[in-house]
Image: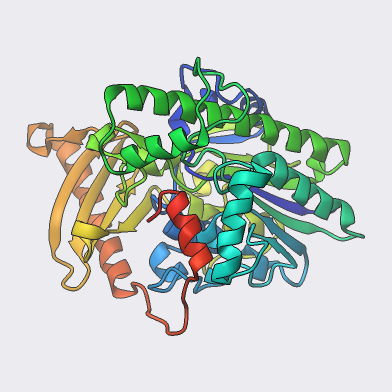
Amino acid sequence: MTKNIILLSIDALRADHLSCYGYDRETTPNIDAFASKSLRFENAYSASSHTREAVPSLLTGRHPTNAIAEDFSLDSETIATSLADTHVSGAFHSNPYVSRAYGFDADFDEFYDDMYLGNSRLFALAQRALDKFVFNRGEYHARAKEINRRSLDWVDSLDEGPFFLWNHYMDVHGPYNPPDDPPFESSQISKVEAQRLYSRLAKGEPSEKDVRSAKDLYDGEIRYADEWIGRFLDELRERDLFDESLIVLTADHGDLFGEHGRYAHPRFVYPELTRVPMVVSTPDVAPGVIDDAVSTLDVLPTILDFLSESSEALPGESLLSPDESRRNEFAFSSATGENEREGLRQFAINGVRRGYRTTRELDSGDIAAETAIRLPDGEAVDIESLAEAEREAYDSLRRTLLEHSDEQLGTRFREEDGASTDDEIEKRLEALGYK
């Protein structure tokens, strides 16, 4: 059997807005159908809460501090490198933070990052004008329909041999402006209005009406992405590729809509930001729902396991492993602070029902804040009010998290010279709300 690897990641998709994860709206009928015949992980957590740290960990199987340099450029081998001797590899997305400018094209045979006019300032301005006024593709990112077309054209161009394909869909990411008629909003929104709405969210200045509208539009984007992911899976079936492939569907992080008094995806590790969907399909594993806490760091070990290769050097473990043989009880997340939180790093340990967060100073390692939480809702817990057995369980979580964060602070970002972003990258990042 030809063992193809297909990774489908969706930017900014929080798990609890998928209907198969209990959401009260039917946002994901196609993903639901896919999940019902696959392994669906109820408590999957991303390694971080924003793309710059989450996607590198997803692709390398390593914690953010080991996956990237201090300027967020790639600093570890990815899935493409691991499979370079056995698989042809292709990547298709339009997120500037995982583009060629940050080294993410390494060892990919085909790498489409939507930087089609190059990196000069003149070309950047021209591309923005073409995108906005001529091509009308969306708000500074390629839509799922286009990602599907390019990736399937690439698959069809291959002569033989197994392939690794990574599609990263940007549709759910703000600004929220679902094409056609949004299914959860009575009126259409223009691209300009969507940009202004997302800006108010990112600045923490939305009205109640803004938040209601943003949720409707966000869910509409999910429904749109779901439609095209469903079509992509159908195309795989038509090509007789579905049943002979490992297919992993996940996300890099979620978005906030007022939880904890915050919006979009700031650099915190609240469970609403880090809990993501995780669905794994292989021809050899029976479908089911797994409650164990798992991590996006487990994706690369899962791929290696599918290929009967070892992943002992990685911190994660295969999602195909039987429950009783898994060694990791928890999933860790972390994020470096920015603006007034510069110089801090927040860490979280996520179990099935319990979790713990701590904020530590990067230079000294001192603890700036810490909170015990219930999962998956993230509600803070007063440990002193708990029964002794519960207090001991949280104390154990705290000790494990402090040990993990000690290790990560000791290996945090190694600064490297020579990496920079150009005008095009900066403008695209600003349009996506990153700047």
Q: Quadrant of residue 407?
A: bottom left
> Foreground: 121 or 345?
121
Q: Is residue 208 left or right of residue 308?
A: left
Corner quadrant of residue 280: top right
So how many labels did they put on this image? 0
Q: Position of residue 44 (x, y in %)?
A: 46, 42
In the image, residue 193 above or below residue 326? above
Decide if residue 99 is in sight here: no
Q: What residue is shown at x 55% (from left), y 55% (from top)?
A: 95
Residue drawn 47% across the image and 78% down it = 419
Could one spot residue 90 in this view of the protein? yes
Tell me where residue 349 appears, x and y as whole percent: 31, 49
Find residue 334 and report its horizontal and vertical position in percent. 33, 56
Q: What percent of the width, then of the height, locates residue 308?
A: 70, 60
Q: Residue at x 50, y 51 (%)?
A: 296
Question: Residue at 38% across / 73% down in the picture?
Answer: 70
Q: Quadrant of the C terminus?
A: bottom left
Which residue is nearer to you in this view: 160 or 341?
341
Please, which residue is most extreme toward the left here? 384
Looking at the image, residue 238 lies above or below residue 83: above
Judge from the rendering whether residue 40 lies leftward or rightward of residue 162; answer left or right: left
Foreground pick, 194 / 41: 194
Structure colour scheme: rainbow
The residue sitting at the right extreme is 159
